[in-house]
Amino acid sequence: AGSAESVADLPESRGDPRVVSRLIDGENSTWEAEHMWLAPYQVGEPTTVFLLFDKPVTLSVLKVWNYARTPSRGARELQLSIDDVLVYKGHLRRAPEQGSAAAAAGDFGQSILFTNDPAVVAREREHVYLHHRDGGSSDAHSPDSDDDLVLLD
């Protein structure tokens, strides 16, 4: 989207550590700018990320950590295409505010499941986010959500 791949490419933000190489640096549940990526926001323009693999891979879980330094700046929606086929379209959970009860829980990543493997479902259940059309949301493990996760075959 646009010519800048991160805010560090903008003249007023030269030297900003939130560059695209931070997307996969192994530090995920954090509020430290040195482990985040921030793309310039352009109204009406999607931000696109391409991950290319040298050989075929099996994808059972996509784990996403939303932008946490200023949670309101994180992504709200995600579309995932594999080999030009849309396989997921949904909402992302906002990262918790630093110091909040949700943040104290530790890992605030969100899991998108592409498997029915019971071990994977059990391991990732607390990280599945359910967005409701009325604007509400819940985590899949909360007592007031449905007992069954909706999984893709």
Image: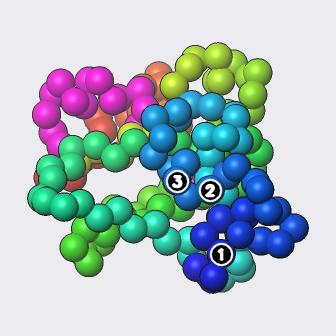
Disc 2 target residue: 19
Outermost residue toward the front in this view: 15
The kind of residue tagged 2 is: Val
Q: Residue at image x 39%, y 42%?
A: 63
Image quarter where the N terminus lies is: bottom right
* 77 vs 109: above or below: below
Stretch in magenta:
115-135
Q: Residue at image x 74%, y 32%?
A: 97
CB within 8 Å, label 3 to label 2? yes
Q: Which of 138 and 35 is in front in this view?
A: 35
Task: Give the secondary structure at mark 2.
Answer: loop
The kind of residue tagged 3 is: Ser
Judged left or right of residue 152, residue 8 is right
Q: Residue at image x 30%, y 39%?
A: 149
Judged left or right of residue 122, residue 43 is right
Res 127 quadrant in image: top left
Q: Which of 79 and 36 is in front in this view?
A: 36
Judged left or right of residue 55, residue 11 is right
N-terminal of the pair, mark 1 or mark 3, is 1
The kind of residue tagged 1 is: Ala
Which numbered dot is residue 18? none
Q: Residue at image x 65%, y 65%?
A: 6
CB within 8 Å, label 2 to label 1? no
Task: Give the secondary structure at mark 3.
Answer: helix
User: How far from the left and from the top, in percent, is residue 80?
Assistant: 36, 64
User: How far from the left and from the top, in percent, is residue 128?
Assistant: 41, 37
* 7 vs 109: above or below: below
Disc 1 target residue: 4
- Magenta residue check for 129: yes
Disc 3 target residue: 21
Q: Nearer the viewer, residue 95 or 90?
A: 95
